[in-house]
Image: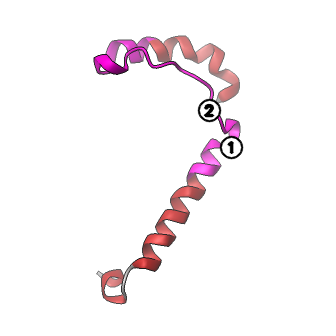
Amino acid sequence: MTAGLDLLAPGIAAHIARTALPPFRDVPVLPAALGDNAGLVGAAALAFAARTRAMSLSPSQASG
């Protein structure tokens, strides 16, 4: 996705300008800082959060 940003950014920015709440209409469209690994890092963060949450539950909370 980051490789095609130069083609997609104008349309994305136009959509944001039309549909976003006024304070957010001029938010810049930039490539992800993590590049092509952004999805992988996001999935790992969700898995880690779910595991941490599951480990913090008591046995009675975990079953229901």
Name the secondary structure under disc 2: loop
Left or right: 17 in relation to 21: right
Coordinates of residue 45 in the picture (x, y in percent): 55, 57
* First to last magenta residue range: 14-42
Q: Quadrant of residue 60?
A: bottom left
Tell me if mark 2 has few (under 14), some (14-19) or many (20+) residues whose alpha carbon lies within 10 angstroms of its own. Answer: few
Amino acid carrying label 2: it is: Ala
The residue labelled by disc 1 is 37
Label at residue 1: none
Which residue: 42% across, 78% down? 56
Coordinates of residue 4 in the picture (x, y in percent): 66, 22
Tell me if mark 1 has few (under 14), some (14-19) or many (20+) residues whose alpha carbon lies within 10 angstroms of its own. Answer: few
Q: Residue furthest front?
A: 23
Which residue: 68% across, 35% down? 35
Coordinates of residue 29 in the picture (x, y in percent): 53, 20
The residue labelled by disc 2 is 32
**Quarter of the image with the N terminus in it:** top right
Circle nearer the N terminus (1, 2): 2
Q: Residue furthest bottom?
A: 59
Amino acid carrying label 1: it is: Asn
Q: Quadrant of residue 48?
A: bottom right
Q: Is residue 63 above or below residue 45?
A: below
Q: Quadrant of residue 36?
A: top right
Which residue: 63% across, 21% down? 5
Within the magenta stretch, is there residue 64?
no
